[in-house]
């Protein structure tokens, strides 16, 4: 393990300060101090980083179009086990470590669950000593910064590189790669073979920026390689003689610069429907081509037979955004390595595996043929051939035209990316048991029936090092006091906490810690939003992207109902509650933005009504992201996981909240089902339609929202509030929401689940008053959260997918 003494650290820090900034420490800004600290840490790990990279075991490459890393300093110090010596050393230099921790930018290079999962996976791969590296895009602008203006979401461009640089990254111009767009393909005769010549293409340089991913208390340092797009200014030994010529005019040169740089300029801010835009397709090919070329370049250096690629390399496609890995690998094997189609296909399918993250039709990527053909002529030829061969297979095996139509890769002038992934990979997994079941039985049924052995489940997880040890140190220390520290490397040991479930003093300690965390959050809310919240109230939290299926609307309508009940009956026995929302809406998602405005308007009314504001407070935190999550989650009493059953593939905030002792209020959707199985019915509050009921409703025309509205007084009351002026400062947003519920018949069963939800909330109200029982439920949640560490998830990927049949699998079977 790397280590550094306090004395040595102080020396290195001072030297680095001089060499970087030529100024004394006392004159430095927090950003400068942070940059110096990052450099010192990078020096400490450099040797191990190099050594990890020349390891000879099979390597995993995890392709994801987003990585939502969060701040790195604290988690790096934790994983390196040097926080204390660095904290003390800095103190002696007159610097507070916490100031530097807070000075770090939080790179928002992802939308939500998908990108955060990828970041947790990197942490676990390194911590399990897997040589697993990430490939993604270094967006110049990450997810927009959210501001509320008069209750409306306003998007401000995210400028995470405004400090001039990201201190953790290392740029490697010597490893740049050329990615080719557009142009024409010519087949030229070369002896007795046809050679592929790509002419007049537009060369875009993929410049790698490497971020070290540090394993927990081990020597593994993996790499997250993010590519930035640039003009091709130097050739670095890559032959680009057939490229289009841009040196003609100044205008041409500028147009070329724009073309290249635009690709990694901005992250698409959608989390649930795909934007079928040309630029997005460029992004997808840009990072997959760069990554695949990089892998092959590295592999060639080992001088091993290309036919053994699958023994040394596993390529994982996270959702369909990196699908083009498949034809790109085929291209290299065919055109550069000269393999036959059959050989190339075997290697490709044996190397690549795919994870699906949604069953929602609107999120399924389908790219128009013409777009792919023009942008990526050679890749399109390969996709066409994959499709042609697959159609032969289908025609041979099935008569049912409908079924075959469903399974084709090219269909209705589009390339269906999920179908291409399924056909081109050896493993397809869903992200929670229910989700995988729905894939097998509903969405991908034909494929499952065709090749059942390819399908498997890998329930998501969370990096417990960040989401418990680092963000909730007091709880983490209590756990260690009670059961020792083995749980840090094996979270299933958390189960040992169960033996304290009748121990009043432990339960009280747990309560105290939760209270401290709530006080910290209350201070933060007070300082940031100028709203007073009561730490003795129940902190009820819903933090996730804003989407109709996640049903923030159900939550706020219930709050409104509660408000009415309180007004009608001021003595209504109610434990004070603080409802906390955090959510960004995709900028083009109008209904989601209306819901934000509605929540903010209801908050305004209730928070300013002295008749109730001792009992109810609503806080909608601006710009929700990883750093805010780290503050909110340790302080939560209740985690709202209230999606329309069948719609949330897994969810991961459910796991984070549970691990921090929140009680889950949930539908039996996504991984909530498994949380329920872990904690048992006494330790979770369930409500709502079952998956089967939702499927049946959807099959047979749904229920009548209008009938329910007309027959239920309380439901009618809150729905009418959307349009009767009861909530001030609303424009047409209320009508928009009203229409989604009544005119368009409540696609997400908000009103259908409302009564049941409100009963569940009433149950919570009662339970919380029995403090000891509540604390016991909290303890049981923590004790049974161990299975949701990504260490478990990743060891399953390792043994069932990436290293299946490999010698080194032995290592992971023991995990
Ligand atoms: O992936 C999320 C699911 O909704 C969650 O249920 C799940 O827990 C999580 C991790 O498996 N999906 C998600 O976050 N998707 C996106 O962010 C997304 C981004 C771009 C896009 C489509 C979806 N075009």
Image: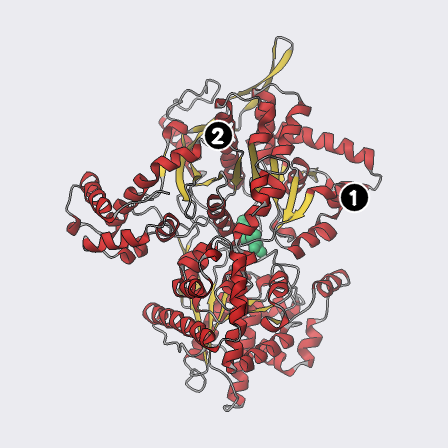
Q: Are marks 2 and 1 in contact (CB under 8 Å)?
A: no
First in residue order: circle 2 vs circle 1: 2
Q: Foreground: 151 or 500?
A: 500
Decide: is 463 above or below 204.
below
Residue designated by label 2: 294
Residue at left offset 53%, top offset 73%: 501
Tell me the tag on residue 403. 1
Does the numbered disc 2 mark a residue whose Cβ is under 8 Å from ligand 1? no
Residue at left offset 73%, top offset 63%: 692
Which is more foreground, mark 2 or mark 1?
2
Q: Foreground: 386 or 708?
A: 386
- Label 1, residues with CA under 10 Å away: few <14, some 14-19, many ≥20: some
Residue at left offset 40%, top offset 38%: 210
* Image quadrant occupied by the N terminus: top left
Residue at left offset 39%, top offset 43%: 140
- Label 2, residues with CA under 10 Å away: few <14, some 14-19, many ≥20: some
């Amino acid at each position: 393990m790397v280590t550094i003494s306090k004395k040595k650290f102080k020396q290195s820090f001072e030297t680095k300060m001089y060499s970087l900034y030529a100024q004394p420490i006392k004159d430095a800004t927090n950003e400068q101090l942070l940059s110096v600290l990052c450099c010192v840490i990078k020096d400490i790990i450099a040797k191990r980083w190099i050594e990890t990279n020349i390891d000879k075991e099979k390597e995993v490459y995890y392709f994801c179009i987003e990585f939502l890393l969060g701040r790195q300093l604290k988690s790096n110090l934790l994983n390196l086990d040097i926080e204390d010596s660095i904290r003390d050393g800095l103190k002696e230099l007159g610097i507070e470590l916490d100031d530097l921790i807070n000075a770090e930018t939080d790179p928002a290079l992802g939308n939500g669950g998908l990108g955060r999962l990828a970041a947790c996976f990197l942490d676990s791969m390194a911590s399990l000593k897997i040589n697993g590296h990430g490939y993604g895009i270094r967006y110049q602008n990450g997810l927009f910064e959210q501001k509320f203006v008069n209750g409306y979401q306003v998007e401000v461009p995210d400028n995470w590189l405004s400090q001039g640089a990201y201190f953790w990254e290392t740029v490697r111009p010597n490893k740049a790669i050329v990615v080719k767009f557009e142009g024409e393909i010519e087949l030229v005769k070369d002896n007795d073979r046809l050679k592929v010549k790509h002419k007049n293409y537009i060369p875009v340089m993929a410049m790698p920026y490497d971020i070290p991913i540090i394993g927990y208390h081990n020597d593994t340092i993996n790499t997250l390689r993010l590519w930035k797009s640039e003009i091709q200014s130097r050739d670095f030994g890559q032959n680009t003689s057939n490229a289009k010529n841009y040196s003609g005019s100044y205008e041409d040169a500028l147009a070329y610069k724009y073309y290249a740089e635009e690709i990694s300029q901005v992250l698409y801010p959608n989390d649930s429907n795909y934007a079928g835009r040309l630029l997005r397709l460029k992004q997808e090919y840009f990072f997959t081509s760069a990554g695949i070329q990089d892998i092959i370049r590295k592999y060639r250096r080992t001088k091993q037979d290309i036919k053994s690629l699958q023994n040394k390399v596993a390529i994982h496609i996270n959702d369909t955004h990196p699908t083009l890995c498949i034809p790109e690998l085929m291209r290299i094997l065919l055109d550069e390595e000269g393999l036959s189609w059959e050989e190339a296909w075997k290697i490709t399918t044996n190397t690549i595996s795919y994870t699906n993250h949604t069953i929602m039709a609107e999120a399924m990527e389908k790219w128009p043929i013409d777009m792919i053909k023009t942008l990526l002529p050679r890749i399109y030829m390969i996709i066409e051939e994959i499709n042609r061969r697959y159609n032969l297979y289908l025609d041979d095996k099935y008569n049912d035209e409908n079924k075959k139509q469903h399974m084709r890769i090219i269909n209705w002038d589009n390339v269906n990316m999920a179908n291409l992934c399924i056909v081109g990979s050896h493993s397809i997994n869903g992200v929670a048991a229910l989700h995988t079941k729905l894939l097998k039985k509903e969405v991908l049924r034909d494929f499952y029936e065709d090749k059942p052995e390819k399908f498997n489940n890998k329930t998501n997880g969370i990096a417990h090092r960040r989401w418990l040890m680092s963000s909730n140190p007091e709880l983490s220390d209590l756990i260690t006091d009670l059961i020792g520290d083995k749980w840090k490397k094996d979270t299933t040991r958390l189960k040992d906490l169960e033996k304290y479930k009748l121990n009043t003093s432990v339960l009280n300690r747990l309560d105290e810690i939760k209270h401290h965390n709530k006080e910290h959050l209350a201070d933060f809310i007070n300082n940031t939003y100028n709203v007073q919240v009561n730490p003795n109230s129940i902190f009820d939290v819903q933090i996730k992207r804003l989407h109709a299926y996640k049903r923030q609307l159900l939550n706020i309508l219930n709050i409104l109902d509660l408000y009415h009940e309180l007004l009608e009956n001021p003595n209504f026995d109610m434990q004070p509650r603080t409802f906390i929302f955090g959510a960004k809406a995709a900028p083009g998602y109008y209904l989601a933005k209306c819901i934000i405005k509605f929540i903010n308007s209801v908050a305004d009314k209730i928070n300013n009504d002295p008749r109730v504001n001792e009992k109810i407070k609503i806080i909608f935190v601006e710009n929700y992201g990883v750093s805010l999550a780290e503050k909110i989650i340790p302080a939560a009493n209740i985690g709202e996981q209230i999606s329309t059953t069948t719609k949330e593939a897994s969810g991961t905030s459910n796991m984070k909240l549970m691990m921090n002792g929140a009680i889950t209020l949930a539908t039996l959707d996504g991984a909530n089902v498994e949380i329920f199985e872990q904690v048992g019915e006494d330790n979770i509050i369930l409500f709502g339609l079952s998956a089967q009921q939702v499927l049946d409703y959807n099959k047979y025309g749904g229920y009548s929202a209008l009938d329910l509205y007309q027959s239920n007084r309380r439901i009618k009351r809150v729905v009418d509030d959307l349009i009767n002026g009861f909530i001030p400062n609303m424009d047409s947003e209320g009508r928009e929401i009203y229409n989604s519920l009544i005119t368009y018949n409540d696609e997400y069963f908000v009103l259908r689940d409302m009564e049941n939800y409100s009963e569940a909330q009433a149950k919570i109200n009662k339970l919380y008053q029995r403090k000891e029982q509540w604390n016991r439920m909290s303890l049981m949640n923590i004790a049974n959260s161990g299975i949701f560490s990504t260490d478990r998830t990743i060891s399953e990927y390792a043994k069932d997918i990436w290293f299946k049949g490999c010698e080194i699998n032995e290592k992971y079977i023991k995990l």
